[in-house]
Image (tube, rainbow, N blue to C red):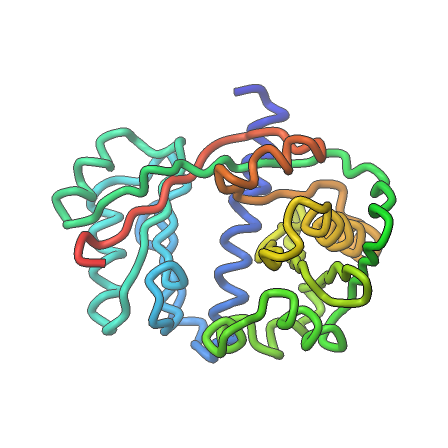
Amino acid sequence: MTERLAALRAAADENLIAACDLLREHLGRPPEARRRFGAVEAMANGHEVAFYNPVLVLDGAATGDDVATAVDWVERQGMPCSVHVADLAPPDLDHALERLGFVGEAQVNPVMALAPIPPPPSAPPGIRSRAGGLELAEAWYGAFEAPERFRATFNEGFLGDPRVRIAVAELDGDPVAGAAALRSSQALGIYAVGTAERARRRGCGRAATWAAIEAGRSIWGSEVAVLQSTTMGFPLYRSMGFETVGTLRIWRRQSG
């Protein structure tokens, strides 16, 4: 990996940790709910969904013992956890996770970066994008047709935090897509990108994502945007200029 790609990957990892920690803060968990075990970060965020109580294995120095200790710490607090393993991690961690009863998702998610951030393109005809803070909360929730659990996770405290900007794309005045940008010291991270099924393949998700990126760039002066893509989202982000700087695989308990 070149020095440039390594720096972008480090920025992406730092932003992911910041995002998980910000979630902890706005779910009302104390600072002690974030712990480091060797080279592994763990967040006991008190969420009923394992994904939001992450054990983050982003460092090549992580060991199976680090992971096992972190998992035990989260689960002893009565919370399900997920383990997010970067391609930088030692390959023998897969066997360690299997022994702990975890199963890796078949999909390996690209970690992507956009640097420098270019000016955003114009939205397609009929699509209007807006970015802001808490004043856009109801439109943002509406774009996702968000159930109560989604609202409780990304609550008003989170959406109104000055380290977060949210964006909404509207189709003929109806909010149909959303995205969020989160600030860390090295980058802005893009999270929670989604488009209502009725509005897909029309450029709405792209417009919301660009609006979130531009909001972060203009307000925070960020020069790098990062995200963890899905396989489905990868062609979109690549067409926007993002490049792959690594991968991340999520592991969950076999029992669910």
Relative to the observer, which residue lies in front, 246 or 143?
Answer: 143
The total number of labels drawn is 0
Task: Residue 173: name its quadrant.
Answer: bottom right
Relative to the observer, which residue lies in front, 91 or 176?
Answer: 176
At 20% from the left and 69% from the top, the residue drawn is 76
Relative to the observer, which residue lies in front, 65 or 181?
Answer: 181
Relative to the observer, which residue lies in front, 74 or 170?
Answer: 170
Quadrant of the image containing the C terminus:
bottom left
At 27% from the left and 65% from the top, the residue drawn is 80
At 27% from the left and 29% from the top, the residue drawn is 91
At 64% from the left and 72% from the top, the residue drawn is 142
Task: Residue 71: name its quadrant.
Answer: bottom left
Residue 28 relative to residue 53: left or right: right
Q: Residue furthest front?
A: 198
Q: Position of residue 66 (x, y in %)?
A: 25, 48
Task: Residue 241: name its quadrant.
Answer: top right
Q: Residue furthest left?
A: 99
Q: Position of residue 88 (x, y in %)?
A: 40, 31
- Vertical placement of residue 115 versus 176, above or below: above
Q: Position of residue 229 (x, y in %)?
A: 53, 42
- Vertical placement of residue 184 versus 230, above or below: below
Q: Position of residue 200 (x, y in %)?
A: 64, 50
